[in-house]
Amino acid sequence: MRYQRNEAPVDAGGLAKSPAPTGASMCRQSATVCLIKSPVRQHRVTGPLATRLRTPADPRHRRGKRHPFVSVMLVACSAVVAGACSFAAIGQWARNAPQDTVARLGARTVTAFGARLAPSTATIRRLIIRTCPGGPADLPGYNPAGTNALAVDGKSARSSRHADTPAAHLLAAMTGTGMTVTQLRVPDKTNEITCFAALLEPYDLTGVTVTADALHT
């Protein structure tokens, strides 16, 4: 190999060779230069919503889980906040979300380069139906800031009973205008009393009057 005046390396035929770009790596199979962006460690989403989503028990069997429970729920909540109004729209948002976004939402790593895989539409649908029968719009809840009073009440979700599976019982906190602040599914083997504190725990209710039926007094 010899050098021309511009100091660019050339081969025996006189053809100039371009130096490999900084940060590039060679693909062994194709022997072509592939620019690979190094994965950046992202901080996961934390806060009241992430804390509240850890309260419900994961209804899935221990075997066969591909995506973390809280991650699936955070992806669904983010899609709803972004305007998704159906499971199909939530799944589409998850597929199109940037890598740094799904990384912060806790999506699992699937390659050695740190690529993240968001949950599929089917996975999101199954988990939400079993955890929050009220629908995906109830997941993020409503900001209670500026609210003077909240009413807590529990109801069984209509048409949620199937064969030997009992109807889903939901405990919700609402404003005087009917806006849902937060909602949790009451586990089958417990009652509203055990979920009352967990329902409101993530929120600062200073100066807010909370009303409930006689069961909680």
Image (tube, helix red, strand yellow):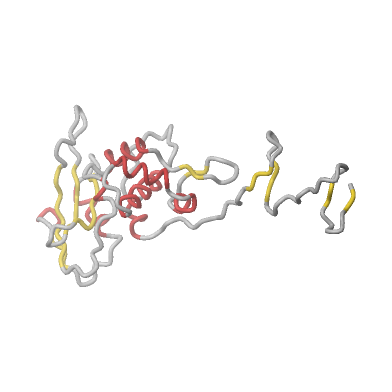
Taking depth in this image into account, of 36 and 151 the one nearest to the observer is 36
Quadrant in which residue 127 is drawn: top left
Spot occupied by residue 120 in the image (x, y as percentages of width and height)? 39, 38
Residue furthest to the bottom in view is: 207
Residue at 21% across, 31% down: 165
User: In the rendered view, would you say 163 is above or below 113?
Assistant: above
Residue at 46% across, 46% down: 107
Residue at 19% across, 56% down: 180
Spot occupied by residue 43 in the image (x, y as percentages of width and height)? 49, 58
Residue furthest to the left in view is: 214
Taking depth in this image into account, of 167 and 15 the one nearest to the observer is 15
Left or right of 14? Residue 208 is left
Quadrant in which residue 166 is drawn: top left
Spot occupied by residue 204 in the image (x, y as percentages of width and height)? 27, 67
Left or right of 63? Residue 15 is right
User: In the rendered view, would you say 125 is above or below 81?
Assistant: above
User: In the rendered view, would you say 31 is above or below 184?
Assistant: above
Quadrant in which residue 174 is drawn: bottom left
Spot occupied by residue 148 in the image (x, y as percentages of width and height)? 16, 69
Taking depth in this image into account, of 23 and 125 the one nearest to the observer is 23
Residue at 28% across, 63% down: 203
